[in-house]
Image (cartoon, rainbow, N blue to C red):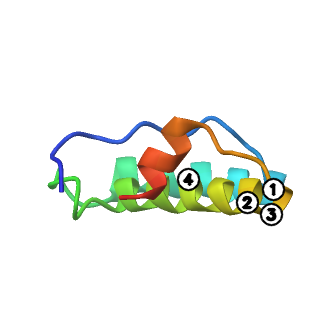
């Protein structure tokens, strides 16, 4: 696994307003109160990014369309 940080997927396809609010709250919570900097493979913020990308990818698949490359790359981690 790469030591490079993943981008936050800005695409909100298939993400409810409540999910996006909770996701931001969790991300900010991990940033402020979470563990010290870790390798990206163990960082809870990176896991949140991957989970978000996988949800967006599933939404695109449900619509029967092709997801952007950035979403596919992040979701494959």
Q: Could you say where residue 12 lies in the image, as x and y percent from the top left?
A: 73, 43
Which structural element holds mark 2? Answer: helix
Asked if disc 3 and disc 1 are in contact, CB closer than 8 Å, the reply is: yes
Q: Quadrant of residue 58?
A: bottom right
Secondary element under disc 1, as helix, strand or loop, is: loop
Q: Mark 3 points at which residue?
A: 62
Dot 2 or dot 4, earlier in sequence: 4
**Which residue bears the numbered disc 2?**
61
Q: Which of marks 1 and 4 is in front?
A: 1
Q: In this view, does 44 lie to the left or right of 51?
A: left
* Quadrant of the drawing holding the N terminus: bottom left
* Relative depth, front residue between 52 and 59: 59
Give the position of the C terminus as an image quadrant.
bottom left
Relative horizontal placement of residue 6, taking residue 50 as reference (left or right): left
Q: Check disc 1 and report the residue beneath it.
A: 64
The residue located at (27%, 59%) in the rendering is 43
Among numbered discs 1 and 4, the one appearing first in the sequence: 4
* Crowding at mark 1 (Cα within 10 Å: few <14, some 14-19, many 20+): few
Q: Name the residue under label 4.
A: 53
**Can you say whether 17 is above or below 19 in the image?**
above
The CA distance from mark 3 to mark 2 is: 4 Å
The answer to whether marks 1 and 2 mark residues whose Cβ atoms lie closer than 8 Å is: yes
Give the residue drawn at x 65%, y 44%: 67
User: Residues under labels 4 and 3: Cα distance?
Assistant: 14 Å
Of residues 48 and 58, the one drawn nearer to the viewer in this rendering: 58
Q: Is residue 64 left or right of residue 21?
A: right
């Amino acid at each position: 696994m790469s030591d490079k940080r993943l981008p936050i997927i800005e695409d909100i396809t298939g993400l409810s307003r409540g999910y996006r609010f909770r996701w931001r709250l969790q991300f900010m919570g991990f940033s402020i109160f979470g563990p010290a900097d870790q390798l990206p493979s163990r960082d809870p913020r990176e896991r949140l990014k991957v989970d978000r990308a996988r949800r967006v990818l599933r939404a695109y698949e449900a619509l029967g369309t092709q997801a952007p490359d950035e979403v596919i790359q992040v979701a494959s981690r």
